[in-house]
Image (cartoon, rainbow, N blue to C red):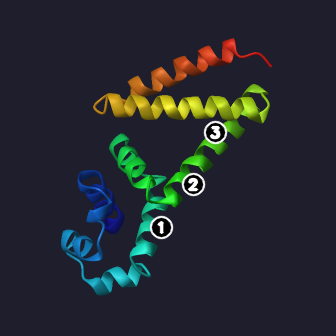
Amino acid sequence: MIWFETGLRLLVAEGPSALTIERLCRETGKTKGSFYHHFSGQEGFRAGLIDWWKTHRSAAADRAMRRWAAARPAVEAMDRERIEARALQISVDEGWDLRRAREVALLETALKLGLEELFPEAKTELLERSRVRLYQQLRHNVTP
């Protein structure tokens, strides 16, 4: 959707202050009437942008969302949900208790975010290989 594509592009390039209705309309070439047809207001747009980001992620978008998270509890809550979902998957896959699985899920997330921050131009495959390598080490060195 053009509204969310534009919003995410602005968030990455300029930060949350760029997410005004006027700016979004100017950048999309749409009217305020069109904006309000799709969203109840700026908060409705921002909530929708967070939901849209869940399935349209990139390293740059993730970094922008992290910066926004300080002022947006919904972004932080989405991160917690993602870590919890990963912990549940690890718990089932590895047969670990949920506490241990949460620790590993948190480490995976920290590794991914740290690598993306340190090496923003790194290829996705490199980041994924690093994550898998750490996970393999954790799996072999963690005892029940």
**From mark 1 to mark 2, how far is it between C-alphas?**
12 Å
Q: Earlier in the sequence, mark 3 or mark 1?
A: 1
- In the structure shown, which secondary structural element does the residue marked by tag 1 occupy? helix
Q: Residue at point 76% right, 15% down?
A: 143
- In the structure shown, which secondary structural element does the residue marked by tag 3 occupy? helix
Residue 77 quadrant: bottom right
Q: Residue at point 19% right, 73% down?
A: 26
Residue 24 location, x and y as percent? Answer: 26, 71
**From mark 3 to mark 1, how far is it between C-alphas?**
22 Å
Between circles 3 and 2, the one closer to the viewer is: 2
The label on residue 77 is 2
**Residue receiving disc 3:** 86
Residue 23 location, x and y as percent? Answer: 22, 71
The label on residue 80 is none
Q: 10 Å neighbourhood of mark 2: few (<14), some, or many (≥20)?
A: few
The label on residue 47 is 1
**From mark 3 to mark 2, how far is it between C-alphas?**
14 Å
Residue type indicated by callout 2: Ala
Q: Residue at point 46% right, 60% down?
A: 72
Q: Residue at point 59% right, 46% down?
A: 82
Q: Residue furthest bottom?
A: 33
Residue type indicated by callout 1: Ala
